[in-house]
Amino acid sequence: MSIILYLFYAILTIAYVRQFLRLLLSLSYNFKRKRNQPVVYPKISIIVPAYNEEKTICACLQSLKNLDYPNYEVVVVDDGSTDRTFEVASQFGTAKVIRQKNMGKPNALNNGVLAADGEIILTVDADTTIDRYALRWIAARFGVNKRLGAVAGNVKINKEKSLLNAVQSAEYAIGINLVRKGQSVLGSVLIVPGPVAALRREAIACAGFFSDDTFAEDFDVTLKIIKSGYLVEYEEASMAYTDAPKNIEDLIKQRRRWYRGMIQALEKHSDMYFNGRYGSAGMFGVPNLWFDAVSPFLNIGLLLVTLLLWLFTGDIQFSLVGIAVYLMLSLGVGIVGLSLEPNPEKRNYLALPLLIVYNTFLEGIRIMSLTEELVNIIMDWEKPRR
């Protein structure tokens, strides 16, 4: 009986500590951060890989046309689209449009980089629009720190009138951007997201460009940049608005690709685990991501231990109080995290309680993805329905 009780305490304590650390690190990011205007304006090449995106690429390119930055170019790489993506993109005279046979997103990005001549490369997904001032904040980051190899932008969800869209918007703010703030404070940002990823051109070259041997080319290239000796940071003011899955089926497809890609990249770069050569990214960042990959099993363990306590003692009240306190703590962290976001949305606060159920659903997808990867089930890259 005492062993079960100690196990319950241990699991719950880990959960408490992780939530407190997320809160403290995100607060530290906002209090320490200085917003500097760029002193110089390096040329930024914006690469837009596109495959069958005729319905979204017009809005994307229009947002890029309206950017407030004096020195940039746009390069669209049509990855063998079978619709009118190439024709729609070609209507924007300010963009250089390249057409290639279908070779996948990493190859499209590489061809875009080779066709561009900017000092900074910004990758933007074709279903994403960029905030008017995003490039200025990126330039300021790179101008201050010459060792900086990449900057992760702030990805937000295009607002739609659906419950799933609202919950995903809250998840991006709390489950992704809040975490990146803490990683940035610790110097261990490990993913520059495809919708708004800024990379120093020389860092991409040192990293060997983008690879197509994982489902997470953005995660993979970030790790390679870190291993090449560069730093990676997060810039919350550099905002991008991307389309989110509109139904459960597309959400499952997206997250299976994310989670399996993350596991593939972690396995590929296993030499970083607890390796002081890579600083806090090796000692803290990569091990923490492995913890995230297996955390659903820890949460299941917490529920099983709660059930065992009830079976052996007949008293479940103590366990439920511990879990309730954790849920309240999570809610408090969510409220603070949303308040720290630039341009916080009111609907995100209302969606916070729903994240409990939503995150449990995502944990099920994580378990499925990890199992599929372990038994090497083949999976294709599937696009969401437009």
Image (tube, helix red, strand yellow):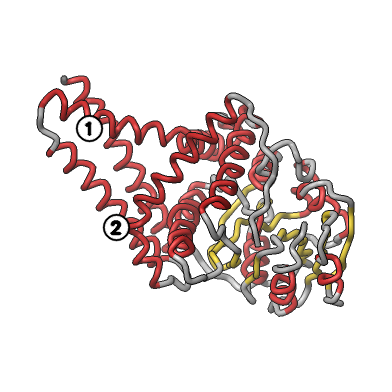
* Callout 1 amino acid: Thr
Q: Label 1, on which residue? A: 306
- Quadrant housing the N terminus: top left
Is 225 on the left-hand or right-hand side of 104? left
Spot occupied by residue 316 in the image (x, y as percentages of width and height) = 14, 35
Q: Secondary structure at mark 1?
A: helix
Image point (52%, 70%), residue name: 159
The picture quadrant where one finds residue 385 is bottom right
Image point (62%, 53%), residue name: 193
Q: Nearer the viewer, mark 1 or mark 2?
A: 1
Spot occupied by residue 197 in the image (x, y as percentages of width and height) = 66, 57
The answer to whether 125 is drawn above or below residue 268 in the figure is below
The picture quadrant where one finds residue 188 is top right
The answer to whether 65 is drawn above or below residue 176 in the figure is below
Q: Are marks 1 and 2 in contact (CB under 8 Å)?
A: no
Is 217 on the left-hand or right-hand side of 91? left
Image point (47%, 73%), residue name: 343
Judge the density around disc 2: few (<14), some (14-19), many (≥20) Cα neighbours within 10 Å.
Answer: some
Spot occupied by residue 306 in the image (x, y as percentages of width and height) = 22, 32
In this rendering, does residue 50 appear at all?
A: no
Image point (78%, 54%), residue name: 201
The answer to whether 271 is drawn above or below residue 262 in the figure is above
In this rendering, does residue 72 appear at all?
A: yes
Q: Tag on residue 332?
A: 2
